[in-house]
Amino acid sequence: MSNNQAVEYEVIENIGIIKGMNPPVNALSYLVRKGLVNTLKELTNNQKVEGIILIGDGKTFFAGADISEFGKPIQEPDLNQVINTFEESEKPIVAALHGTPLGGGLELAMGCNYRVALSSTKLGLPEVKLGIIPGAGGTQRLPRLAGIEKALSMITSGIPINTKDALKSGVIEEIYEDALIANALNFIKSKLHLERHPIVSKTSDKISNIDNQIFEVFSKKIEKKYRGRKSPLYAIEAVKASTNLDFTEGLKKERELFKICHGSKESSSLIHMFFSERQALKIPDIPKETKILSINSAAVIGCGTMGGGIAMNFANVGIPVVVIENSQASLDKGMKIIEKNYLNTVSKGRMSESDFKNKMSLIRGATNLDSISSVDVVVEAVFEEMTLKKEMFERIDKLAKENCILATNTSTLDIDEIAESTSRPAYVIGTHFFSPANVMKLLEIVRGKNTSKEVIASTMKLAKNIKKVPVLAGNCDGFIGNRMFHEYVRQAHALAEEGAKVADIDRVIYEFGWAMGPFAVNDLAGNDVGWRIRKRHKKEGKYDNLRYTSTVADQICELGRYGQKTDRGFYIYDTQTRQKQIDPEIDMMFEKVAKEKGIPRRNIDDNEILHRLSWALLNTGCMILQEGFALRASDIDVTYAYGYGYPHWRGGPMQYGQDYGLKKVLEEIEGFRENNPDMWPKCSYLEELVKENKKFN
Ligand code: T1G
């Protein structure tokens, strides 16, 4: 029977079953909340009903509050009211969990008397990932169920746990392999004879006599791990309240802290990220029903750092992959690195020995290109050099089977030129992985002018399957990510030539929340990579007339200071510890170059460093949007958050600028342009947005 469209119920014998019907994830929207309360009332009044099962229809139990309602006035009943009604029910309720009971969903389940689950269920309180804390009793009920340590770990990380863990820590009572409803029916029937049923908020054994030191230890850990973030710290405070306040007061404290987080920039930025990541999957000119090519086997050409990492992505999800090198020695070396990477995970206890063996068995090495003849996708990851790539694609074209996706891992080269060396440009696409390729989540997918819709849709799907976050880019030099990064690094060099110290530039960026500053990144990636690209640009006549041309970057490469791999780059690295040390020599090199170029030196404050670097990214991002090489500003934000270590909680380079105010950003850019016209190309798209007082998309 239907209470409203979002909640239905039925009665089987003496048990009422309340079912959430809000696809795709049963988010607890207003209609669901209202439906839940009304349905419970009906079942309470139904004399025949002695016990109740709460379940979600479709792929999951309630996966949390409806995020799209955030920021709008709350329509009652709010979730706390719903949970109270369930907790006070006269008839026992079991929450039957499957899929992803997350956030408000798990909070609702904890308001029921019992919880049982299918074994594949993942349970969690991921609110900190949205810059908030659990706001419907999660910080008060989870510690009572699972203990302080488990609650702190789950709530501050936001990472869901599996059912084994949930059973062990007392969050659920039983696990089933299948037949959830039938099992839940038996479960609740077996409890009907009891006079009393457990109520989580009324228990306290697991929160008594807690040593307060645990909160300090967690806070210290969190401050380091989530540098700059506030919500995980508020979450700790809320959990602490469960130990020194009674339930009602604890709930009030949670609400108070929830409200602080709810209105924060951290939260709006992370929510922007959540929706942007999903939006990036939608390609306007590619209909949902586009045919998807199935990918059950893969080949990766090149088993260097990138190739090996790419191959691991396939093996990790059970796709057999052949890696190809041109000599047995290089292949052996590459395979050893893959093995070492996996063994590292095993030694940390994050992978079992049998899992390791299974993954390694999916990766086969070969020195002959013929091995690609039966695979569904080939990813070329050879040296970044056009002639070499074209030769390789000519050979791949001759050997690969019909319908095979031919992907290149180029980070800057022209996809169309590569595609022209084959007889099937419709099957050629860019798949730009980020280093280390087995870790970094971003996959920049580059469409050439002839890439077919099927190939684009299939590659986007493949990216999801191998657990990457895909963003579609157009075929311009450097695509989205590196085209912007190139300007960002050029700006960093200009700052250093004008008088900012290398270490100060990196410090400002690190303090802003990036994983590393631009010079440290270059040292990590290898300064020779950019050097090669600049040499190619020079050959192509690009940037010839520019005043800032990363002169010192070229000079240090001429000195063999390629970065961490040579123990010297913009910094000096300790061979053993990798600890970096400032090298005054480098700042002197910048000073010398400035003198030669006639660039006046001055003191540059942190604010100017941050804004010039931030707006260099934003201005280039706007140029990319104007030229149609990115679909939307939010795709650029996703690119930076998942591929470049940009702090998610700042929302990405475009959103950060928009939050600051595009009008102010443009005014500052115009000021910077007076000094350095060639670094700040005028972008009519940005000017138009400001003129019309509009926002991105
Ligand atoms: N609210 C609204 N929409 C949601 C949603 C939610 N909670 N979760 C997912 N969607 C949409 C999503 O935008 C997408 O839409 C579609 O559903 C499928 O999602 C009071 C305050 C559940 C693991 O943080 O982690 O409870 O793009 O592509 O890969 O304390 O979605 O198709 O139009 O991600 O199968 C806490 C967030 C909320 C869970 C499923 N809950 N969701 O992954 O599908 S805060 C969360 C997820 C809260 C309380 C607080 C995942 C998923 P579209 P999808 P999926």
Image (cartoon, rainbow, N blue to C red):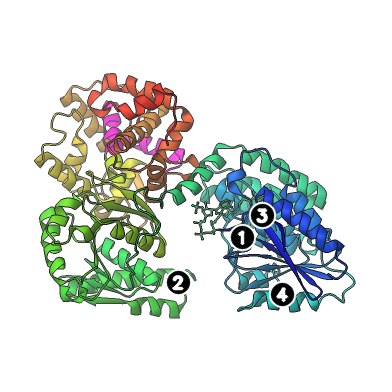
Q: In which quarter of the image is the C terminus?
A: top left
Instruction: From the top left corner, tell me how far across and down residue 696 is, in percent.
Output: 42, 34
Question: Magenta segment range?
Answer: 487-515
Q: Which circle marks residue 184 in the picture?
A: 4
**Mark 4 or 2: the one toward you:** 4
**Mark 4 or 1: the one toward you:** 4
Q: Upstream in the sequence, badge 4 or badge 3?
A: 3
Q: Which secondary structure lies at badge 2?
A: helix
**Mark 3 or 1: the one toward you:** 3
Q: Where, by quadrant of the figure, is residue 192 drawn?
A: bottom right
**Mark 4 or 3: the one toward you:** 4
Q: In this view, does 101 lie above or below 672?
A: below
The residue carrying mark 1 is 124
Question: Is 398 displayed left or right of 578 in the figure?
Answer: left
Q: Upstream in the sequence, badge 2 or badge 3?
A: 3
Q: What is the C-alpha distance between the residues marked 4 and 2? A: 39 Å
Q: In this view, does 351 lie above or below 668?
A: below
Q: Upstream in the sequence, badge 4 or badge 1?
A: 1
Tell whether label 2 touches label 4 (CB within 8 Å).
Answer: no
Tell whether label 1 touches label 3 (CB within 8 Å).
Answer: no
Instruction: From the top left corner, tell me how far across and down residue 351 is, in percent.
Output: 46, 72
